[in-house]
Image (tube, helix red, strand yellow):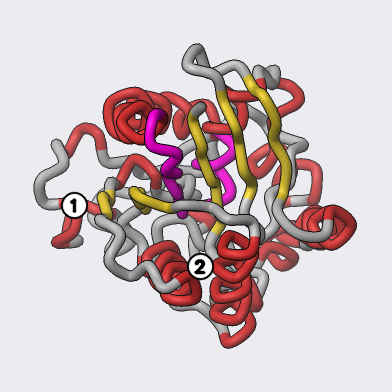
Amino acid sequence: MLDLILLRHGQSEWNALNLFTGWEDVELTDQGKAEASAAGVLMKEAGVDVRFLHTSLLSRAIRTSQLALDAMGRLWVPAKRDWRLNERHYGDLQGKNKKETADQYGIDQVKIWRRSYDVPPPSLPDGDPRLPGSDARYRDVPSDLLPATECLKDVVARTLPYFESGILPDLRAESSLGGAVLVVAHGNSLRALRKELDGISDEDIVELEIPTGIPYRYRLNDDLSIVEAGYLGDAAAAAAAAEAVAKQAG
């Protein structure tokens, strides 16, 4: 049986400020660090045998993974990091306050940018310092693959091939040994994985809210059919945390 854990990073500094974050590299808040450690405790208490780790290239996901594994006594777990697990690129909205953006463009327009499956926000203009091409962590990524904006459909298109080529082989390698694969990423890259594994439609996936810092565990058959799935720990607490995400302004 395949054992897969999906974990959204703990609260970031820009989550707390209600800013569009995307590919901007921001750190965890104290609350986010506590969430990450608590996630590790939940996994340890559930007997999760983490043997492989996959993260994005963004510090908030990497830091979350380190704190969670430290709480489990498993800092030794080998890690693989890939840009395809990054958060959705929010284009010219990155760094802007969600409520103020809604006031400027209208809440309906911002809702389309945030929640439609295939409509991206305004693109970053050429030469904008927020473009990822000048960042050393992406120097080996072909420039035509680096986004200036993305919709959720774009995130699905880049995340699922990495699941097939990077994550799934590790899941299969550990299936006979009982080991688990931990993926620490972001709201939208995890939506992409949930969409595939749960068979969620294009229309419904945009309504899926993923709370920060609470591990979601899949037990899967070899054909990726679900044996069981759900958040570790208190289900009511996970639902409340997801509801809090849904109420963010903008």
Please give the name of the residue rendered at 11% of the width and 51% of the height, measured from the top-left corner: 139
Residue 2 image point, x, y percent: 49, 30
Q: State the residue lying farthest toward the left.
A: 140
In the foreground, 206 or 147: 206
**Residue closer to the observer: 10 or 91:** 10
Q: Secondary structure at mark 2?
A: loop
> What is the residue that sits farthest to the top in this orientation?
223
**Residue 111: which quarter of the image?**
top right
**Residue 123 against residue 93 in the figure, above or below:** above
Q: Could you say which quadrant of the image residue 66 lies in? A: bottom left
Residue 91 shows in this picture: no
* In the image: residue 200, left or right of residue 44: right
Identify residue type, mark 1: Tyr
Circle 2 residue: 95
Q: Tell me the residue at 67%/24% (across/down).
A: 227
Categorize mark 1 by other alpha carbons within 10 Å: few (<14), some (14-19), many (20+).
Answer: some
Upstream in sequence: badge 2 or badge 1: 2
Quarter of the image with the C terminus in it: bottom right
Q: Which residues are magenta?
A: 176-192
In this rendering, the label closer to the viewer, 2 or 1: 1
In x, y percent, where is residue 59?
Answer: 36, 68
Question: In the image, residue 32 lies at what x, y percent?
Answer: 59, 76
Kindly identify the residue that appears in the image at 48 percent across and 45 percent down. Answer: 88
Q: Residues within 10 Å of mark 2 (few under 14, many from 20)?
A: some
Q: Amino acid at mark 2?
A: Gly
Cα distance between the residues tagged 2 and 1:
20 Å
Check if residue 185 falls in the magenta segment: yes
Q: Is residue 201 magenta?
A: no
Residue 240 visible in the displayed image? yes
Which residue in the protein does label 1 denote? Answer: 138
